[in-house]
Image (cartoon, grey):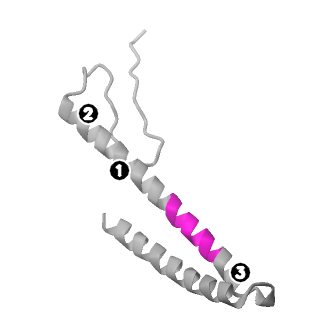
Amino acid sequence: MSASHLNLVDLSGNDDSELYVLGRGPETRAERIRRMQANAKALAREQIEAMTEAMLEVARMADEISTGGEAYPVGVRELASRLKADLENQSKSIEALMMRS
């Protein structure tokens, strides 16, 4: 029987990830730093995406309140209307900044 070879396959869909080659030996410090920095950037991106989604959810709630009629006090409706517009603009700004990086 011939020896089989194992191939590592990246199923994450993340093109930035690097695969560790078995049998290559221990990582150098520089390799470890690069890997850890890449992981930190990926986690930061995930957190920013979650924050943006939360901002848009609050904007949807603010829209409901601002158009909710007399059940809501006038000052609250006005504040909710401004909050909705601000959150939508801020989330667009964040998305634009993320596209640059």
Disc ID at residue 64: 3
- Check disc 2 and report the residue beneath it: 32
Q: Which segment is the magenta one?
A: 50-60
Give the mark toward the camera: 3 or 2.
Answer: 3
Q: Residue at x 24, y 37 (%)?
A: 33
Q: Is residue 98 left or right of residue 60?
A: left
Cα gap from disc 3 to disc 1, whole angstroms = 35 Å
Q: Is residue 6 left or right of residue 58?
A: left
Viewer can see residue 16: no
Residue 71 % position (x, y) = 81, 85
Residue 95 % position (x, y) = 42, 70
Please, what is the three-letter code of the amino acid marked with disc 1? Lys
Please, what is the three-letter code of the amino acid marked with disc 3? Glu
Cα gap from disc 3 to disc 2, whole angstroms = 48 Å
- Check disc 1 and report the residue beneath it: 41
Viewer can see residue 65: yes
